Image (cartoon, rainbow, N blue to C red):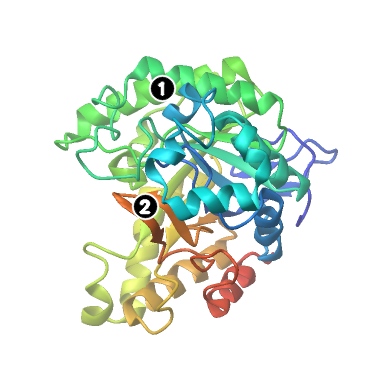
Amino acid sequence: MMNKPDFPLSTRGSQIIDASSPAKVIRWICVNYVASLETLLPEGLSHLTPDELAATITSLGFNCVRLTWSIEMLQKGHMNAVGPGSAFSKYASETAQADIIRVNPWIAQATVLQCLERVIDALARQDLMIIADNHVSKAAWCSSVNDGNRWFGDSCFPVDEWLAGLRQMACIAKRHPNIVAIGLRNELLKLPIHHGLSHTDWVHHMSLGARAVHAENSTLLLVAGGNFAAGNLGFIRSHHFVPEIKDRVVFESHIYNGGYVDPLWKRLGYKWTSRYLVNLIENRNGFVRSLKTRPAPYFLGEFGLNCQVYPRAANDAMFFRAVTDWIRKEQINFGFWCICGSYAYREGQQDRNEDFGLLTADYKQVRNPELVKVLQDIAKP
């Protein structure tokens, strides 16, 4: 691992530091790895063993994995991982069901939680830090605006179950010191949009989540993404988030090329649009690094693009250049979306290809070496 840390981690101003003396500054060079879909298992196990996947992640230059998980996965952690009655048998194709036992024979006797911990242990053997990100409550792709997973108290987001799940993951982390942080919730979105009410609601509930994790396991960093799908932390300027929890909070945001940004590349050109994009990220989220009285580390937890067409898709290529130039210049902690080449089941489709995945659909090759080279370059000090 680059600059291997001594655990646990903590924060010092805008930096993440380790427990050595003197403390080393740690930078998260992460890739997202999905384990939050309906099968209740980490993706790719029909193609690779956990150790093979972990070794692949390390070989690509990452020191960290943002591992997504669902509350439902923990609630059903005692269930068989595969075989009759399992979520995998319900959702995965017959081919995937046969392949997962052929590639990972141990899984035939494993529970859902044992499978997750097997993957966590494999990542630890490669010295990979883990940010255990609570992606959803009901296991599913994140996210549609009406899936019931987006805001506190929604139909699939009971607050008491969410808090119980956070506590359980914090407890699991005691057995796995490479779990260095918990992401409290992915891409929160209050609909209909009501700025003042949703900000107050965010502070109240995310404070409950942070305190639940910290009470169970005080060594963990607490990663908090803002409102509007982890797009805006501006309200943090006037809200002191969990002030009693010292040196543990990291703020995150996500950015993709889409919506109102995508048309600007052609209309206004690279120079103006890239400057606009970086200013947008900084003003809405990155500013937490420079808060006068309580600066905090910032983590770009998700960014990515269609790896299959890079750099031929001009707008995506300009977006990627702008974001990666900024990451390199500012030495930003980042998480690329994602390592997965395909999903056993996603949004009603079995064996679905992941265009944004660094690996091919069979997990055997890198999809785009040119893109990986850029990610390796921005990981350098």
- Percent coordinates x, y for residue 357 in the rendering: 48, 63
Check the image and name the residue furthest to the right: 21
Q: Residue at x 71, y 26 (%)?
A: 175
Disc 1, SS: helix
- Percent coordinates x, y for residue 199 in the rendering: 28, 30
Determine contact: label 2, label 1, CB under 8 Å.
no
Judge left or right: residue 73 versus residue 178: left
Q: Residue at x 85, y 38 (%)?
A: 21
Q: Residues within 10 Å of mark 1 (few under 14, many from 20)?
A: many
Query: Which residue is labeled 2 in the image?
Result: 283
Disc 2, SS: helix
Disc 2 marks a residue whose amino acid type is Asn
Query: Which residue is labeled 1 in the image?
Result: 162
Judge left or right: residue 55 versus residue 334: right
Disc 1 marks a residue whose amino acid type is Trp
Q: Can residue 222 be seen at all in this image of the molecule?
A: yes
Q: Is residue 21 above or below residue 205?
A: below
Q: Residue at x 53, y 44 (%)?
A: 42
58 or 27, which is in the foreground? 58
Q: Residue at x 66, y 66 (%)?
A: 60
